[in-house]
Image: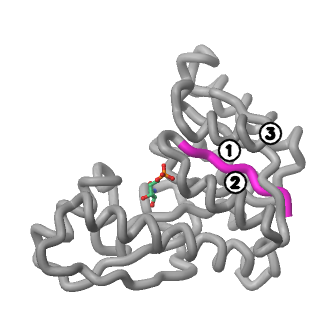
Amino acid sequence: MKIAVFASHGGSDLQAIIDGCREKKIDGEVVVVISNNGGSLALKRAEKAGIDRFHLSAETEGSADALAERQLAVLEEYGTEMVFLAGYMKLLDPRILERYENRIFNIHPALLPKYGGKGMYDMHVHEAVLAAGEKETGVTIHRVSPKYDSGEIIAQTKVPVLPGDTPESLRERVLAREHEFLVEIISKIAEGKY
Ligand code: GRF
C-alpha cells in the first residue's frame, strides 16, 4: 500500500509509520510526505529516511485553490493509495476528500467524539481531559470527512489518566500509545480490514 503522510510539526507519528513499514509490520511504504510547515521536524524526518517530501501551503502555492491542485498532483504522481494525517493542522480540500474517499485517515489524541472539533488539538485536548477530571483518555483513528475530527471512527484504544498527571505527562503517555496503535491499525488497513 502506497501511503502519503501529511504532518505539520514533530512528526513522531510519521516516524512510527515509517518504522512500521521498514520493520515490515505494515505491508506498505510511505511514498511521500507533505507538510504545510517548511521548518517542521516532520520534513526533516522524511529527509533522513530518504522519502520524497514537499512543503506546500497556500502561501507557497499562491492560493488555497492552487494548493489543492498541487497536493492532488503530488498524491497522484506518487500513486497514493492511502492518505494518513499524522498531526496535520489544516483541513483538506473537498477535491482531495472526494478523490481519496474512504482512504484518508486521521489520528486524534482522545476518545472521540469527546474532546474533538475545531481548536481541540495537541495540548488543548489533554488540558481539557484533565480539567474534566476524566479517569481515562485514549487515541482515535477515524476516516476524514469535511469537518474537523468527524468521520467514521474505525479504532480506539484507552490510555489511563494517572493521579498527578500534567498536560505534558498525559501527552507523552498518549503519544507513546499512538505510535504502537498506528502500526497496528495501519497494518489492518493495508490488509483491507478497514
Ligand atoms: C498527535 O498527538 C496526533 O494525535 C495529533 O497530533 C500529534 C502529532 O504528534 N493529531 P507528532 O507531530 O507526530 O509528534
Kindly identify the residue that appears in the image at 33 percent across and 64 percent down: 116
The mark found on residue 189 in the picture is none
The quarter of the displayed image where residue 163 is located: bottom left
Magenta residues, as a range? 1-7
The mark found on residue 98 in the picture is 2
Question: Which mark sits nearer the N-terminus, 1 or 3?
Answer: 3
Decide: marks 1, 2 in contact (CB < 8 A)? yes
Across and down, in percent, residue 185 comes to 64, 77
Looking at the rendered structure, the kind of residue marked 1 is Arg
Neighbours of disc 1 within 10 Å: few (<14), some (14-19), many (20+): few
Beta carbon at label 1 within 8 Å of ligand 1: no
> The C terminus lies in which quarter of the figure?
bottom right
The mark found on residue 50 in the picture is 3
Judged from the image, the secondary structure of the residue bearing numbered disc 2 is: helix
The quarter of the displayed image where residue 19 is located: bottom right
Judged from the image, the secondary structure of the residue bearing numbered disc 1 is: helix
Residue, disc 1:
95
Residue 83 relative to residue 93: left or right: right
Mark 1 vs mark 3: in front: 3
Pick the residue in front: 74 or 188.
188
